[in-house]
Image (spheres, coloured by chain):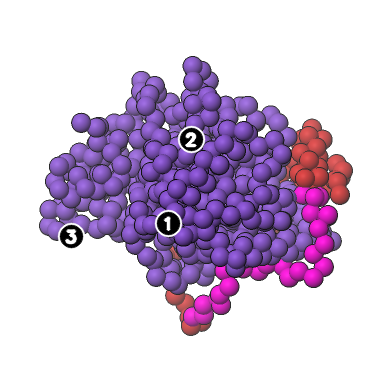
Amino acid sequence: MTALNQLTLTEAREGLATGEFTAVELTEAYVSAMAEARTLNAYVLETADKALAMAAESDKRIASGDAGKLEGLPIGVKDMFCTEGVRTTAGSKILGNFVPPYESTVTAQLWREGAVMLGKLNNDEFAMGSSNETSAFGPVVSPWRRENDKAPIVPGGSSGGSAAAVAAYLCAGATGTDTGGSIRQPAAFTGTVGIKPTYGRCSRFGIIAYASSLDQAGPFARTVNDAAILLRSMAGYDPKDSTSVNRAVPDYEDAVGASVKGKRIGIPREYRVEGLDPEIAGMWEEGAQWLRDAGAEVVDISLPHTKYALPAYYIVAPAEASSNLARYDGVRYGLRVPGRDVQEMYERTRATGFGPEVRRRIMIGTYVLSAGYYDAYYVKAQKVRTLIKRDFDDVFALGVDAVLAPATPSPAFGIGEKSHADPVEMYLQDIFTVTVNLAGLPGISVPAGFSCKNLPLGLQLIGRPFEEETLFSLAQVIEDAAGRFPVEDTWWVE
Amino acid sequence: MSVDQATVRRVAHLARVAVSEEELEPLKGELNAILAFVEQLADLDVANVEPMTGVIPMELPMREDVVSDGHYPEKILANAPESEGGFFTVPKVVE
């Protein structure tokens, strides 16, 4: 029999409903798996006691017939989500001792449906990074390794802890946030499924802000169906977030397995960038063929402003970050480093509390918003966003239902391999994902192949606003054709 | 556009981040690498393009202008590095 923690979320839901095992038994399996996997550094805080207490309550509700949609299912939470009474750090020293007095809406909805919280997952500091190496808690180690090579590999970022924990069976599913690719890139690196829904689909209330016009929450899971189950409970209108959209949340599970016959899939020629890894290019072609075999029509399209997306992102995101992170001043919460006067206290607190990548982005943001530069940088970048969104509007107007592209330009790299390079080299990781955030569209990453070194690779599907269902249907076709990508060797178990 | 050491010092001050003299030169290099990267946008003519103000076209919701939350100062102060008598405290600001 498969160990309980290796079941998919869908299988675990079935086992709990039929009484094959209890929520406490399932949670215990995860709690011991987490204790054996500390070398991966996926969790920054394990909440085993809370998890077991929540599971016991779930068992009571299952027995009395009051089970919620996620009853008894153990979930990990990215440390960007505020959890009431449970330390929340954003992976930063500046929030090292912050215990939120309130709960984020997304996690509150998970607990309302009966999910069990296993703990808080590591991420790049304030979600700024693509390898989980900027976290104040140190890097997360991927459960994947290159063939015949023990060198540690990054799980991607910024939701590296979420991706690694789902892949390594340390939770049945996890929450993530995605500002430029922080769900889709780590999902691709770890053989997991990750979806960033349409901007406004999930409430941002209680999620520590990085770049407010780009940030969006979404789930990580081991299968497409599992991701559909989780997103249904995470999504929905929230009066506490004025950018959340008041629109009914469909049952995404109904879309999984639905026919994709006649769907029109666009292949954007601008994504065939120079130097694209041939393995990635091959997987991309294979993915298009799988969709064709399932009855979809595959057409070439053009998204002419694609190459301007990443430069625009590195104006918009730091600008918004510099404003959002102004609140960390050593006065109301978090770290305080004393100084002679209040000015020096602010400067020392922020110099000590923020890591180098966060400091860099705050300074870039401050510069582009400073007097005389606002129009040249920020307004210009917002105009480029209009053009990028128009590119997508134009192809959707031609009847394209979704765009198929790689999720990342390369397979996962080793820890430390890029950390001393020019910061821009790391930014290029998001070349295929960032357009989606700038245009506010939904995007899903689904595992689709292996690199020659036996590391997983992911394909990305981009949809029309609020048409996540189409993405789930198409992603299931890819999962059916490519198979799943479970980690076979649990080498990290001590 | 590129920045010199004096600009790095000024931006660090605006951002309220203490930067030592030794950090200025490496920071200058890193910031200039990023600024050179975003400079690609100069190729693009956006004269007749409206800047994006929201990704999903919608009207901001309105509500009654009334107090809808609050009355728990102890919760708000619970994470403060220093507080006294129901207030946040900071080093002396006025002489």
User: Which of the two residues, B59 or A474, is positioned nearer the viewer here?
Assistant: A474
In the image, what residue type sits under mark 1?
Answer: Val
Chain letter of disc 3 in the image: A
Position of residue B63 in the picture relative to residue B95 (left or right)? left
Q: Taking the image as drawn, is residue A457 in sight? A: yes
Chain letter of disc 1 in the image: A
Give coordinates of residue A451: x percent, y percent.
Answer: 53, 29
Count neighbours of disc 3 (C-alpha within 10 A) and say few if under 14, some if 14 to 19, many if 20 or more.
few
In the image, what residue type sits under mark 2?
Answer: Gly
A324 magenta-colored: no
Residue A260: mark: 1
| SS state under label 1 | loop
Picture quadrant of residue A228: bottom left
Inter-mark Cα distance, 1 to 2: 21 Å
Question: In what quadrant of the picture does the N terminus of chain A appear?
Answer: top left
Position of residue A367 in the picture relative to residue B92 (left or right)? right
Count neighbours of disc 2 (C-alpha within 10 A) and say few if under 14, some if 14 to 19, many if 20 or more.
many
Q: Residue at left 85%, top 41%?
A: B5
User: Which of the two residues, A10 or B95, is positioned nearer the viewer here?
Assistant: A10
Residue tagged 2: A449
